[in-house]
Amino acid sequence: MSGSLHTIMAASDNVSTFQGVSTVKRAPTEELKAIFEKYASVSKGSEKLMTSADFIRGFLGLFPDANYDPASVALLGGIVDSSKDGLISFPEFQAFEGLLCLPDALYLTAFQLFDTNGSGLVSFENFENVMKQTTLHQRIPFDMNGEFVRLYFGRDKSRQISYSEFSQFLHDFHEEYAKVAFKKYDPEGTGFISALDFNDIILSVKSHLLTPDVQANLIALTRGGSSPGSKVSYAYFVAFTSLLNNMELIKKLYLQATSNKFDLEVTREEMLQVSQTMSQVTPLELEILFLLVDLHKQTGRITYADLQAIAPDQYMKKINQRLAAAKSAAPVDRSVVSQMLESAYRFTLGAVAGAVGATAVYPIDLVKTRMQNQRSGSFVGELMYRNSIDCCKKVIRHEGFFGLYRGLVPQLMGVAPEKAIKLTTNDLVRDKFTTKGQIPLYGEVIAGACAGGSQVVFTNPLEIVKIRLQVAGEIASASKVGAVSVVRELGFLGLYKGARACALRDIPFSAIYFPAYAHTKAAMADENGYNSPLSLLVSGAIAGIPAASLVTPADVIKTRLQVVARKGQTTYTGLTDAARKIWAEEGGRAFWKGAGARVLRSSPQFGVTLVTYELLQRFFDVDFGGSRPIGSQSGKVEPRAIQKPIPADHIGGYQLALPIFSGMESKFGLFLPKFRAGAIVPVAPSQ
């Protein structure tokens, strides 16, 4: 086995031996082998092997164009092909997966790129051969006989350097390259280059650190303005390249100046003040930074969004985003105690939120119930209501203002277990259908239906007591009807009268509501994925409209079954009997009685409940080690780039493969030709 492969295998062993060293969990061998054989196109006896094209183009999806450069693909494939026989075996494929799990995977991958003979060391010849294939060297050749190279490889360039030495060499090399380029364009040693030369150097040496916006304004950034004849000093050149390298540090300075707020404007003086704590940032670098921002805004102030527009996302940010996605998709092993504490936490917040929501709309609920219980015709002692407004007026006239809250106490007593069981069941079933952070629509519907079905055990007794109390005021009576007397009258089994109708209402309601809320909430989030309290309230209210209105017929049947029929009124023996008699006696329109009041009650109630629930999570933010509850982020989040989903076959360490290969370009500038010499390069359409 080659020395290079020994290096990778040792790294692979470290991943499985030392906890906390790896950045991502290793892939199961059997799953990884099945994926390897899916892409391997070569067979030697019973062994399947990959070519460099199989790995780079097929598995990773890089160099997709038909006119790709085969030399570049072969060079990148050699990173995994540690035996250097031109083919990749499964042990090599698995070993590289282990390497990608290590914290220094980027430097290890770059080292493997230059270790072209698999010796575990990099010679000057290795380094020279790889560098001459890069597009950077082809544009601005590096002095391979200069002092910088001799310091690392020896005066006669015969010394070979190890991985740890090479990592430092590679870090310093790119900064040296910029100096070499400046000297090339300043042969007289004046310490100045033209604005056009400055533009050429930066586009050649630092293009991986430039956004399109910065690229378009390089000449305008020179101190002489946009005139091509203006001069750029060496100090200005070094400050500009240092600024590009330190943009992540600049972002930290901004957050320090704004106390971790992303939308505040900061002046140059404020940035200068906080920069005194970090010697890496100079006043000239900040001057260039504000000059760059002022090309568009002319305000003399910057925001975090301005910094995002200047600096492309670095490879570590892309890796962290991949890790966050993988972590959110993977189940987390937690202790029983932490899970119990989290359940208690959610139970408490759900109870408070449910109580607030129920209290806010309870008068509407009372009017809805009395409208649904109203029969066609006139009966002795019955109060007839022309509409919901007339009903509200008569309740206040005959029972006082607090008559609108008759039956509220038992409602509040049932809210805690109802909301707890509903939210817990919905989250539990959603987790079962969630894969890599994504859940299909049918999974959302099933989760909501299960949540609605599970709550019936609590809501039916609650509903029947509440309804009996709500309609009690319609008939004048010497004795006051209370919750305890209603429970005694009904008995245990009586509390579940109309349970089938209750299930027929609650299951479809939740199956509609929870998916509608999730999608409406996502649609109403701002560009950073943040939901304001108003957007949460509106999302909950909008989702409640179709859910509440479409299940009104079931709610009418449930109400008729649970209310005590007075003398002369029709009685019902069950769900089917009630539906048949209502249709025969009152017609189809009777099934939609109180629909408006139900929507006016359910829609704002769930809006108030969910906005209260999420704001409570933001205010009482507790991390139990699992997935963070929805709405637990208490402030605006850092703007996020749109990320492509991780390919399904990229498991284990290979979840980070694309950011690592991209990082060799974005951090070290190691760009290889994408197309073969003489090929017609496709032009991207204009935006």
Image: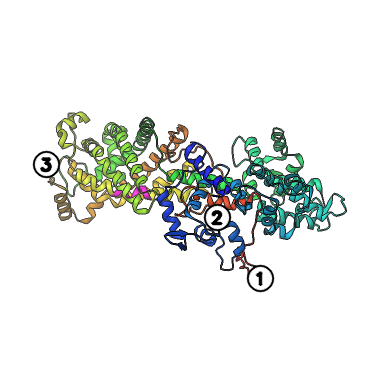
Between circles 2 and 3, the one closer to the viewer is 2
Marks 1 and 2: in contact by CB < 8 Å? no
Badge number at residue 678: 1
Image quadrant holding the C terminus, namely bottom right
Cα separation, mark 2 vs mark 3, equals 89 Å
Amino acid at circle 2: Asp
- Secondary structure state at the residue bearing disc 3: loop
Q: Position of residue 378 (x, y in %)?
A: 16, 46
Amino acid at circle 1: Gly
Q: Rate crowding at label 1 as few (under 14), some (14 to 19) or many (20 or more) other CA atoms within 10 Å.
A: few
Q: Nearer the viewer, residue 376 or 214?
A: 214
Cα separation, mark 2 vs mark 1, equals 28 Å
Residue 73 is one of the magenta-drawn residues: no
Residue 474 shown left or right of residue 313 in the figure: left
Which residue occupies 36% across, 38% down? 357
User: Which tag, 1 or 3, sits closer to the chain's start?
Assistant: 3
Tell me where the magenta segment starts and ends, as one range.
Answer: 508-515
Q: Nearer the viewer, residue 146 or 210?
A: 146
Residue 563 shown left or right of residue 624 in the figure: left
**Residue that mark 3 sits on:** 567
Q: Rate crowding at label 2 as few (under 14), some (14 to 19) or many (20 or more) other CA atoms within 10 Å.
A: many
Q: Position of residue 56 (x, y in %)?
A: 54, 59
Question: In the picture, residue 356 is in which quadrant?
Answer: top left
User: Where 499 falls versus 546 (above or below)?
Assistant: above
Q: Position of residue 510 (x, y in %)?
A: 31, 47
Marks 3 and 2: in contact by CB < 8 Å? no
Between circles 1 and 3, the one closer to the viewer is 1
User: Where 439 falls versus 342 (above or below)?
Assistant: below
**Residue that mark 2 sits on:** 81
Badge number at residue 260: none
